[in-house]
Image: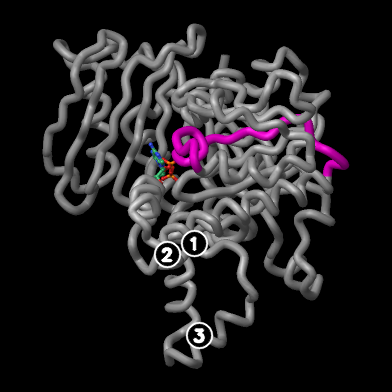
Amino acid sequence: MKILVINCGSSSLKFQVIDAETEELLAKGLCERIGIDGSITYENVKDGKDKVTTTPAIPNHKVGIQLVLDALTDKENGVLESLDEIGAIGHRVVHGGESFSAPAVINNEVIKAIEDCADLAPLHNPANLTGIRACQAVMPNTPMVAVFDTAFHQTMPPKAYLYAIPKEYYEKYKIRRYGFHGTSHDYVSSEAAKFLGKNREDLKIIVAHLGNGASISAVKFGKCIDTSMGLTPLEGLAMGTRSGDIDPAIVEFIANKEDITVHKVLEILQKKSGVLGLSDELSSDFRDLGKAKEEGNEDAAVALDTFAYRVAKYIGSYAAAMDGVDVICFTAGVGENDKDCRAQICSYLDYLGCDFDPIANNTRGKIAMISRDDSKVKALVVPTNEELAIARQTYELVK
Ligand code: ADP
């Protein structure tokens, strides 16, 4: 069965077609600038053809989906004879609140529940729903599955997900830790166990998903018991542009000093902070920061130090939470590609029994061990693949 995977943002729509049985990636692409002007990039991966970019008008997501389907069935460049070959559509949905601890086949009830969570992810859930509705309009008879970023973290116990604030706020408004990147944490922890020839149910694993957005989780015997992102993706590690953990009193302090609203301060914490803020607005991209550090830029060096230090502190706290750790996984843009960042993080981990191997660390693009073979705690690079994980989960529900 072929699965169409859709990751829909407010003005963009990423897609992939994956053969669920062979797990082969057949085609992928991206619609951008939806509602502004429009551009679609499409790549027939199956036949190794070059990427094609065109700029048709894309006034809304429904038109975007139709263009994706046209590209997939194009006589010359398509990978499908007909749309009937698509057995199901898997949608990434950011927030499932407490309603979803697993993927769900989409029906009216599920759509309502996703709408009800929109309060918790006002930028993401409405966009995800737009993608679902656009697919329903164009392919009404194809089964669809929602795969939630928050679902994997629903196994956290109350001591991990409750904030130490008046209980009524949890009861009235469901203010609690939800966590994000769950599909990645789930996928990476199971790939790591497979790679080591072990059952995930026998391992204590820490997954560091270090991309532009970054989060870390503790996966004990196959279940997530803690994660660094919270009610929203702002909490936890320092990120590309997000502050991560700060003293909450800073919000009012800046608002008063700068005479700006709380809303504005939060925007600064989301978009102008993290390594971008620490580097005095030099860059949020670790490639730029690494280069600037080599050239002697102090701010870039401090930004990279702070990032690595924060990751190392979280690893320590999750080792404590699980009473030990067997495997530490690095994934996503920074975790998979930035060997200097990994080396810096691992320099804090001797005490845990993680014997880092700088030569093995010189790796990219594939699953690899970066600790020595006899290291008590294994460190791994594990490329994430959220689309494949969504395709797998979709297939499981509809086959
Ligand atoms: P997201 O999905 O959150 O947008 P990604 O996981 O794609 O993020 O990661 C993007 C980030 O990965 C970039 O901002 C950059 O900092 C980092 N990155 C990508 N390639 C490299 C590289 N070769 N070396 C260092 N960092 C890299």
Q: Label 2 crowding class (10 Å Cα cut-off): few <14, some 14-19, many 20+?
A: many
* Magenta stretch in the rendered image: 322-340
Quarter of the image for the C terminus: give it.
Answer: top right
Cβ of disc 3 within 8 Å of ligand 1? Answer: no
Residue that carries the numbered disc 2 in the rendered image: 299
Q: Residue at x 55, y 87 (%)?
A: 253
* Residue 344 found in image quarter: top right
Image x and y of residue 298, in percent = 42, 63
Residue that carries the numbered disc 1 in the rendered image: 302
Q: Residue at x 46, y 38 (%)?
A: 338
Residue that carries the numbered disc 3 in the rendered image: 254
The three-letter code of the residue at mark 1 reads Val
**Separation (CA) of disc 2 from disc 1:** 5 Å
Find numbered disc 1 in the image and state the secondary structure of the residue it sits on: helix
Q: Is residue 323 magenta?
A: yes
Asked if 170 appears above or below 94 in the picture, the reply is below
Left or right: 174 in relation to 319: left
Q: Label 3 crowding class (10 Å Cα cut-off): few <14, some 14-19, many 20+?
A: some
Q: Earlier in the sequence, mark 2 or mark 3?
A: 3
